Image: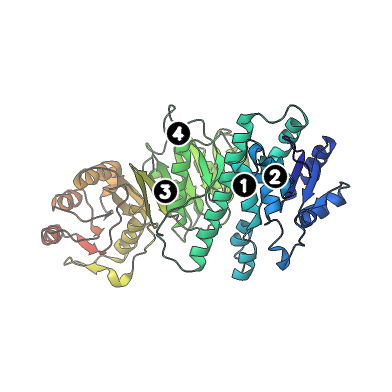
Amino acid sequence: MSSDKTPRRALLSVSDRTGLVEFAAALAEADWELVASGGTAAALREGGLAVTPVSEITGFPEMMGGRVKTLHPRIFGGILAREQDFSEAAEHEMPLFGVVAVNLYPFTAAARRDAPLPELFEQIDIGGPSLIRAAAKNHTRVAVLVDPADYERVAGALAGDGLPEAERRALALKAFRHTAAYDTLIQRTLAERFGEAALPESLHVAGDLALRPRYGENPHQQAAFYADPLAAGPGLGSAKQLQGKELSYNNLLDLDAALAIAACFPEPAAAVVKHGNPCGAATAPQLAAACEAALAGDPVSAFGAIIGLNREVDAKTATAIVADFKECVIAPAFSDAAREVLEVKPNLRLLATGPLDDYRPAAQLRSVAGGWLLQEGDTKTLDDADIKVVSDREPTEAEWGALRFGWRVVRHVRSNAIVLARGSRTTGIGAGQMSRVDSVRIAIEKAGDAARGSVMASDAFFPFRDSIDLAAAAGVTAIIQPGGSIRDDEVIAAANEQGVALVLTGMRHFRH
């Protein structure tokens, strides 16, 4: 058993065998002894390489259906031994390892396809994470590899002057992140399967680097986008960019907002978003008509906007999009004819999500000084049983349709949020003001003449009657809002004085 200071012995135990034989062959060419567990050893033999099975070192066969194979002091001692431990390792016949290449059972793949619990448990790797952590702990002597993308570079270095300390540290960090992410995805999946509450006692997040934008919200800020490995439905993590420049940090935020609005409607729908807020939204029997109506909701703000659509984009819809400058479009798909139209704007970013049937708004995670805030997505829908008409006048059938449409949109607008709507399109939106009446003023100004005959949706109650009076003066005919103010009676009286129908939902939709 070798116990020199630079043992040329590699332990290989992988589930993903991408590049395995080539990597092992490069090590063998550099006079490294290969040691491997069952399936890995078989793959190496098939590749024409000499390999020592793990069982020959441990003196035990693999057992319990492969559950126990590498968990043995002779394996772990050979990985964890420091230079001062070499004599002790030799005394106990522990062969020293200089390379450990391990990747783990495909638990994430099993979780994504909703594998039955017994199968899911069998995909929880035990020995693999232990080997990885042991090697990463002793990285100054043992090179640890968890990613086939590193094989060629590391094999070249080992065949030459060896791995520099900085490279060993980078590999060790990658290894610890690999096992941390693996455990995070296991506990998250099992928490869901076991029916645990959505807000656990401790928070663990794992994501795969999907994009490094040139910068964050501003050029002096760095940023990155991490995709959720367990996200099964459509979203930014799985969307395919078909055309256009690299996505920016701000693009991603606006694309997510546009997708959320479009996806919340069963009818063909379009949303136009700037700086996280919709400036227009509409539904229609045909997507092109919805897109045109959404763009008309605030044509000035729509310049340079992001568009979200919930149907495949056809040529007519594409023509409406390219009539003016837009940053991005996100939709389930784009027809060939639409692609031809959109190609005249080569910098226009196109993202295809696939069908939105399984779209689910994500839980919202935000950082604050000293911690994180986590909340469920705002997904509660309006229940007819909770709707209460409190004015003397009932809304007309047309007003009811517009009120329901406006209520769907207002939850996606930053508070204080006001949406004016007519039919199934927005006519004016007031967002993000510190005073609710100021949001009303902005929505009316945006709507212009279209305010007359529109309805109004508010994400929270009106603290005073001033917003009702202002809206009625502009021609608003019906209002939907949560209610709950200590001055509700004054607000109701104002609506009755103005002949405005007033509906309470009992549900608030703050968005900060």
Q: Element under label 1? A: helix
x%, y% of residue 150?
69, 38
Which of marks 3 and 2 precedes in the sequence?
Answer: 2
Q: Amino acid at mark 2?
A: Val
Q: Amino acid at mark 1?
A: Ala
Which of marks 1 and 4 precedes in the sequence?
Answer: 1
Tell me whether circle 1 and circle 2 mark residues in contact (CB < 8 Å).
yes
Q: Amino acid at mark 3?
A: Ala
Q: Which residue is mark 1?
A: 134
**Residue drawn at point x = 21 percent, y = 62 percent:** 501
Q: Which residue is mark 3?
A: 293
Q: Element under label 4? A: loop
**423 displayed left or right of 252:** left
**108 displayed left or right of 72:** left
Q: CA distance from mark 2 to mark 3?
A: 60 Å
Which of marks 4 and 3 precedes in the sequence?
Answer: 4
Which of marks 2 and 1 precedes in the sequence?
Answer: 2
Q: CA distance from mark 2 to mark 4?
A: 37 Å
**Residue drawn at point x = 37 percent, y = 63 percent:** 380
Q: CA distance from mark 4 to mark 1?
A: 36 Å
Tell me whether circle 2 and circle 3 mark residues in contact (CB < 8 Å).
no
Tell me whether circle 4 and circle 1 mark residues in contact (CB < 8 Å).
no
**How many C-alpha atoms fall within 10 Å of the one at disc 2: few (<14), some, or many (≥20)?**
many
Q: Amino acid at mark 4?
A: Gly
Label drawn at residue 216: 4
- Report the front residue among 507 and 303: 507
Q: Element under label 2? A: strand
Q: Which residue is mark 2?
A: 100
Residue 313 visible, this angle: no
Q: Element under label 3? A: helix
Q: Residue furthest bottom?
A: 385
